Image (spheres, rainbow, N blue to C red):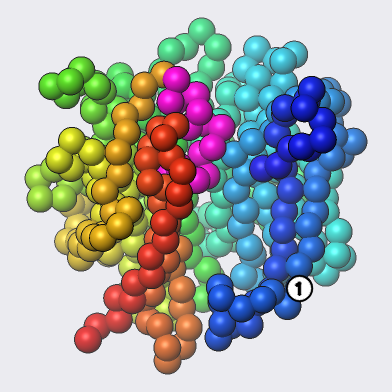
Amino acid sequence: MFRDPTNLNNPDWEIAVVRSRWTQSNFPFGQPLQLSMDVFQDDTHYPSIDEEGTPDWSPDVAYDLETGDVHVVWTTWSTSQSNPARLAYMWYDRSGSEWSGQYIVYEQGNAMNQWIPRIAIGYPGAAFGYVVAVVYSEWQAGISKIHVGGACWPPGTNPNSTADFFHLPYDTGYDAGLPRIAITPRYLAVNYGTIIFTQSLGDEDEDGYEEFQVIEVNNVRDAEEYLDYFWPIEKNDNPYGIFGSIACHFEPGEEASASFNYFEQHSGGWRVANGRFDPTESQPPEVEWTVMTGDGASVTGVLEWPDYVGYTYAHTIQASDIATIYVPDTWDNAYWVAWCDAIDQDATEVYAAFGDTTPG
């Protein structure tokens, strides 16, 4: 997200992508071998959806391991629509060294607000094929509840013609949203996709603040009923958490394995907790837990309305995130974790940590 500091009369955010290459042995401390910046200006937008000067925010990017293509999604805004928050999408064709036009992707006949999209590319199994998949918080005008929605389509195609839309009604009586998604590459022994999101529990703590829980769902869990695919994450019988993120491990020939992190409610605040689990196990699966310690591991803040507005505009730094790394003979199941030092407008710093779960 960026905006023009010389034009203070137009505070709208726009989207840019920075493409870099580092030497494998010195990431992220070395200098990038290649650095280029692609800025999506208003003249690339579809004028029927995205009027000139409207804000764009909450971008996410995914790298296609098979082709080297780059895929980008973000929230754009259209004041002419009854559901103005819309999913914007572009992709970079590395073979042709060019960006596609911008697509506004929404379900025909069932248009919803599509808020804070997250994107992944991979092969969740033969029933899906190789897909670009996006999840987001969705709601419609006149309906108060927010839920988790998504769409997937084959890479390199027009999503307005090829997208399949899906919805995750875990508990429709309460709000749910802020999802993240991860998908395995094609070469793994077990292929799957996994989604993690925050679910309201519909009750309040002793101070009157709403309680939340983190939920994970995937397409390979051993389950008989629909709701048995959804895993409400609890650590030491503590069901309260928020802002989950998920990543698949990429070691070829090994059993399925995924890692997640989230803010666990702890001692009047929040604590960064990580877990590694087998997504094929029935819920609740066994979890190898790690809890962050030291500076920045404990996080403060509550989500009241003024902070929520600020949070939606700065989403990518105030939530937690996790990424796994596979380097043969070096790191077996390593991961990076990043999080912000507060979940409200007091946030000023971003912390990062590296872990290696290789046995021994």
Q: In the rendered view, does 172 fall on the left or right side of 11? A: left
Q: Which residue occupies the foreground of this view, 46 or 15?
A: 15
Of residues 176 and 219, the one nearer the viewer is 176
Identify the residue under disc 1: 34
The answer to whether 307 is drawn above or below residue 352 in the figure is above
Q: Quadrant of residue 159?
A: top right
* As drawn, 317 above or below 290: above
Looking at the picture, which amino acid does disc 1 mark? Gln
* Magenta residues (range): 306-319
Q: In which quadrant of the rendered view does residue 302 lie?
A: top left
Would you say residue 140 sits in the magenta stretch?
no
For the point 38% across and 70% down, which residue is it?
A: 354
Crowd rating for badge 1 (residues with CA inside 10 Å; few <14, some 14–19, many 20+): few
- Looking at the rendering, in which quadrant would you find the N terminus? top right
Residue 323 percent coordinates (x, y): 45, 63
Q: Secondary structure at mark 1?
A: strand
Q: Is residue 316 magenta?
A: yes
From the image, which quarter does the C terminus lie in?
bottom left
Residue 253 seen in the current view: no
Residue at image position (50%, 24%) is 309
Q: Position of residue 93 (x, y in %)?
A: 79, 61
Q: Examine the image and state in which quarter residue 324 appears.
A: bottom left
